[in-house]
Image (cartoon, coloured by chain):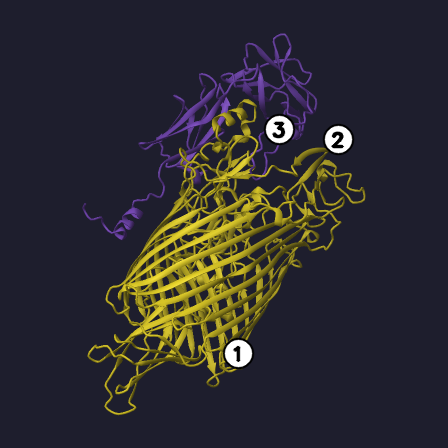
Amino acid sequence: MLSLLLLSAPYALAAEAGALRGQVLDTDGLAVPDAVVTLSGAEIGGELVAQSDGDGRFRFLSVPIGTHDVLVTRPRFTTVRTTVTVRLGESAYLEIELQVASTAGAEIVVEARRPSVDTTSSGVSANLSREALDNLPTGRSYQDAINLLPGVYGNVDTSEGGGGDGNPSVRGEGQYGNNYFIDGVSTRDPTTKTFGNNVNFDAIEEIQVYTDGAPAEFGQFTGMLVNVVTRDGGDEHHGSAAYYLGAPASFRPESCTGKSGSALASCLDRAYMILDPALGEEVPSSLPRYYDMTLSLTAGGPIKKETLWYFAALDLATSSASYPGMPVDQPTVDRGMMGWAKFTWFPSADLTVRVTVAGSSDNTDNSYTTPQYAPEAQVRSHSDDSSARLNVNWTPWSNGIVEAGFGYLQSHFDSLPQSGSRDLPSIVNIDTGEYYGNADSYDLNQRSRVGGELKVTALVPKALGSHKFKAGTEAWVLDDSRELIYTGPGDGRSYEAQPSAGLPCTEASGYTDCAGYTQYDQVGAMKHRGLTFAAFLQDDWQPINPLTLNVGVRVDRESLYPSSDTPLGEREPIVDQWMPAPRLGAAWDVTNDSRTLLSANWGRYFDVNGNSFSEWGDERSAYSYYEYTYDPAAGGYVLSWVQDSALTPSVYDEDLQPAHMNKLTLVAERELVPQLSVALRGMTSRTNNIPEDVNIDDSHWSITNPGAEKFREYRAIELVVERAFDNGWQLMGSYTLSESKGHAPGQFELPSGSAYGSDGNGVGVYLDDVNESKDAEGLRQEYFDAGYGSYLDGLAGLGRLDDDAGYYGYLPYHSFHMAKLSGSYTFDQGTTLGLSYMFDSGHAWEKHTYVPLYGDYYGFGEGRGTRWMPAVHYVDIRLAHAVTFNEHQALEVSVDIFNVPNFDTPVTYYSNDDQNFGETLFRQSPRAIQAGLKFSY
Amino acid sequence: MAPRAPLLHLLPLALISCNTTGFGAISFSPIYSYVEGCVPVVVRGSGFGGDVKVTFGATPLEQVALPDPATEPLNVGYDVYGIVPAAVGPGYAPVTVSSGGHSATIKSEFYYVACPGAGQVDAVYPYDGVKAGDTVTLYGCNLDPALHRVSVGYSDPVPVTSTCRSAEASFVAPTMPDGTFTIHVVDNDGNILFPTTGCGSDLGLAVQNLPHPGALVPPRDTAPDTGGSYCANPSISYGE
């Protein structure tokens, strides 16, 4: 029988917590009942008390994450003091041995033991503690820090394999398949389905990442769930002020001109070789010259001890980068600030309320980084976000918890002409390809997310074993808006100049001497709304002590409303899907001491489509224009092209099924010695029903599930060794052998801000429309017989799923081997050395052939994933030395070096089938250094 | 029923068995030609060895060539080049590729188009910088040296020589002043057989009549490059 949870004073219930259970035994191994177990410490405002039952077992249902003091007392037994560390979402286990006291008041201090294996869960998750974030080399963001975790790949933009925005991905599910939480509340971007919020790095307490077997409580992702838990404050005032400076440190030659023979060979060997599109070959390229500076401030503590805490963080950052070929007086300059404030209030012993407000603003001048754009055609990028979160934790009864969370997030992403002018037109010189005059548009994007969740946990100790029931619901209103305001006279017009043809396109002539112009339709703001709702019920059932069954079911619903002239309240949803997802798992504590785990988990996982999915069904398009070309014979401009302003929208199949994944996960894990565990995991998954736009007749296109099933599969074996931070050092190593194959790497991935279309075959779900129509052969024959066969060139082999191998193959997120090793050691004199190494055996890639019908390189001429990028090694180190002035104040000097060996392995080859095919498009980021000075109190 | 091996034991075997570069015949371009063939084609896939063979229908690909490792190292094993053979008649022809004991057939993709008329010309090479006496090649169909001659602008007709069945023929450029001139195919009586319409057709807007593919960008008018003008008729330019 499990004990009841007793409360003696206000204490902190973390928005995201762990649990603690254990057993009190005597020296003969017999149970000690009625022992009082008390938890206290800086993370607990007060005390948590439990009492052991007849079997000596005790349980704390919800314990704040962190390290806590443990006091165990029992009359006639020696008092024991120890510490225990509880991790996010983990049910830690603690075994206490009491000795019969030979003298009254005798006390023993037991060396702390941090339980490292959760034997009650069949899911796979990883935690990054504050010690890992402080001591390992990272880019000071949670998005970068999670690259340290097993199986996560985010060093490059995985959709194209090049140096990009680094959105992480895992288990072959791509960068758009993850859900991002802050303090248990989703902050995912409604349109892009990537992260929607940055967090001040020093405000992070811990990061938990679920990669496999997540319980029914968590959903709307097929990749990983990232939960960032922020710091609370505390009963002691503390804070920090830090300054960081980053700069390149590769020292590579920028040119090998004038060298010959062995000197030339040596120069080329050291140079950063990159594709020059004009020459069609790799040449030594200068690297961007940049610096970035960040000022990071934190402060936290009590406003009223044990009643009201505060925590605040502020980051001010600026960077300046000069890119190759750009004028030196046109650097890309970024200035941003990010603020965070959190209040934690304990109005009573059983209630905790947290309120967080945060905001950021960022501006980048000269966003275009190629000399193709003249200064007056430059673009300023602006982004900002504001958010508020309310978390309430309430224990109305001793065996239960009620958690409520509410969140509001609004963000803007705008591209603005740096000229500030709406009337000046954008002009392109056809002879040189240069853009000048002005930027062509204002691109205004807004996203918002409002909603929340309610969860109830109840412990039922005696019902065929013990049960930990949890039920809950969540709902969100997701809005986005995009507006393109075109610059130029006549309500939006841009021009083409062709001086070689005697058409200089001058303002003096009133732009009557141009090669052509484009007249845009100003469509106005296009707004979408998505509504999501979810409910779940789960039970962690222990029918017998060493066996826990994780059983649950979750249902999600998504309704999407397209942009339309119809008022929002009167619109019908074009997508309305229910997504029932069972989750079943079993975890067996083999040795019954919380050190050995065997588990199996099967679950179904859905991801929402996202607001951009409904763009295909929009009645309007942001890209609507008329092109005019100068015709000497006519003596003026003639209409040469019309991009329809009122496209027939695509139709959504009434029976459109949501894409879903079925995944089986097996785990064997063992704590070898205290704090050190090793795990062997295997997982296999298949994602089905990936939607596609398929022609159903000649007049309009349908979004449906393709007739022949389209899917992707992932299989892996993963070995993980982890030594939690203790006694000054930590270690994490992993090796993942995996395979990711299928027809489509993503789930209808639309690029950020797109008003129309997908990334095509490289990323999304872009099958050959002509081949998927009901009468594919007949339709293509019409093209041939009408003399338009050239439009279809490149289609052969693209895609009918049932008879074509081109679409199925190794996906862009696939690489066979990934190995990681990270760790840190703190020496007695205050010096810390941190190391991170990652090996990737190389991602799959392929040649893309040109398809005139689509006007771009969308064909898989030789099949998906038939070629391989080279293996890549990433080596980063961190060296820090802290000078301690007194118990509370210290000054730390640090240096992080990224890509220590300065490797320049290609990470992306040019894949379009033209003269540049196979040239290096991106290489590893060159060596860079980040120096820091941090004062903490 | 015999106990099944634990899945964990099977996973390594499953992964080991996957091949990294297997044989696959995936695509070809172009995917149509006139019944006469004679069109250069590239067949793409993976795992193509030196013994690769390609057939269109039952007819072997002509003038088979493989990528030169010295100049096209990235294409070795992935591409095979050749000339489309002639077909018995219009319609779809299956394309079969075999190499190293593997074989793959792509059906209902390559299409033989019936020639729309006599003396059809789709393209010309070279089309600019031509001088009198240069050999100029015509690409099209139903080009018969016995029945057809070519006039350049207002020049007298000159004979043509077949270089690939009736789909390819060449002539010697007559003397003409600098300028751009339409090429006409004429019969032995001097009657113009091709082209029969003048320039200036509204090709751009005509494309709008095609079934809308609903793709990223509707197909643009890709008028053949005839010297920089938007005229669709074959022509050559004399002079610099």
A77 or A337, nearer to the observer: A77
| Disc number placed over residue A308 in the picture, else none | 1
Q: Which residue is drawn at 32% across and 33% down?
A: B100
Which secondary structure lies at badge 3?
A: helix
Which secondary structure lies at badge 2?
A: loop
Which amino acid type corresponds to the residue marked 2 in the rendered image? Pro
Check the image and report above or below for A296 versus B77.
Answer: below
How far is the residue under mark 1 from the one under mark 3? 70 Å
Say which label, 2 or 1, has the lower sequence index: 1
Residue B198 located left or right of residue A271: right
Q: Residue at x 72, y 45 (%)?
A: A492
Q: Can residue A318 be seen in this view?
A: no
Residue A621 position in % (x across, y down):
63, 43
Residue A33 position in % (x across, y down):
27, 79
Residue A376 position in % (x across, y down):
71, 53
A805 or A832, nearer to the observer: A805
Q: Which of marks 1 and 3 is in front?
A: 1
Q: Name the residue under label 3.
A: B209
* Chain identity of mark 3: B
Furthest residue toward bottom = A103
State how many labels appear: 3
Q: Name the residue under label 2.
A: A632
**Mark 2 crowdedness (10 Å alpha carbons): few <14, some 14-19, many ≥20:** few
- Determine the image quadrant of residue B223: top right
Residue A898 located left or right of residue A592: right
Check the image and report above or below for A710 versus B176.
Answer: below
How far is the residue under mark 2 from the one under mark 1? 78 Å
Residue A13 position in % (x across, y down):
45, 73
Q: Do the residues labelled 1 and 3 touch (CB within 8 Å)?
A: no
Which chain is in purple here? B
